[in-house]
Amino acid sequence: MIERLFLRLDGDPSHGPETTVPADTLRAFQVGKQLGAHVSQILLYRETFVGDAEVAERVLPDGAVRLVIHLGDSTLAGPASERQGSVALGAATAPVLLRWRRSSMHSVSVALRPGAASALLGVPAWELQGRAVPLDALWGGAFAELRERMAGQRDDQARIALLRAALEQRLVRSTRPANPCAAQAAMLMAESAGRLRPRDVAQAFGMGERRLQQIFRAEVGMSPKAWSRLARLHACLRVLRGAPVAPPWAALAADGGFYDQAHLANEFRALCGLSPNEFLQRGASLSSKT
């Protein structure tokens, strides 16, 4: 089995340097001004797997709700009950392990900003948490029509233009406008690298902590505490990007707002499915092979 990693942090153009998915299979497209407040990334993925080798791809969590639209035939390895078509992936704090075999992948991934899920999908973000919900269940026949029209376009640029127009129309017609407080609070917590307590964030916006929890559940799809955990991990991963060798983990834990080295290690295992050293070793070895 071939194993590889996928990671994207806010600000990465298409993926982070830890990613070991072949770079030529990924292409980022401009989101556009009208979608910029709701969509953080539109990424096209095209790859063909040959032979009998099975590919396992570990996608590390970034807290975003995603739309994944498959434009061609693709096959997930494993039982039929685990196979999924075009879906909305809810926000999660655990890695997703995808397994591919003998398939040709042609898909588009749309990462939504915090607070945008309800406006674009028509349901509270908490209903998607940790789930993969078929897009035709959320958009009805409109999605089947969109997918068919995208598949029939002459090139990927035209397909993405069609997708952007469809998303813009959904925003215009949405009966669940995005709550700007959710995006602002999420940004504040991310900029503090998870150091700000939910209570302090709530006070900054003139509300009670319980109200902040309600907004996060409805608009982000996870609790403020869970979002803080991801923000702290992401800040740690950014530090590791600048470290040529394994850093002193105890010092990194103290600087990153973890209780101690054990806390850092436990968070890596819970959020990445890997220990800190495994993350560094796997990323380095797979990167050289790729």
Image (cartoon, rainbow, N blue to C red):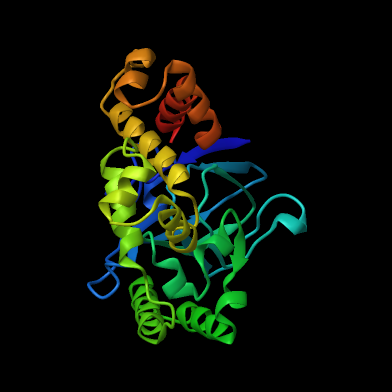
The answer to whether residue 273 is left or right of residue 112 is: right
Whether residue 4 is visible to the viewer of this picture, yes or no, is yes
Residue 223 shown left or right of residue 84 in the figure: left
Q: Position of residue 246 (x, y in %)?
A: 36, 16
Residue 21: x percent and y percent?
Answer: 45, 44
Question: Vertically, is 113 above or below 17?
Answer: below
Where the N terminus falls, by quadrant? top right
In this rendering, is residue 44 above or below 260? below
| In the image, farthest residue toward the left | 33
Residue 25 is situated, as x and y percent measured from the top left of the image, at 42, 53
Q: Residue at x 42, y 41 (%)?
A: 230
Residue 13 seen by the camera: no
Q: Residue at x 39, y 77 (%)?
A: 167
Q: Nearer the viewer, residue 187 or 181?
A: 181
74 and 82: which is toward the camera: 82
Q: Quadrant of residue 288?
A: top left
Residue under the image location 31 percent in, 37 percent down: 193
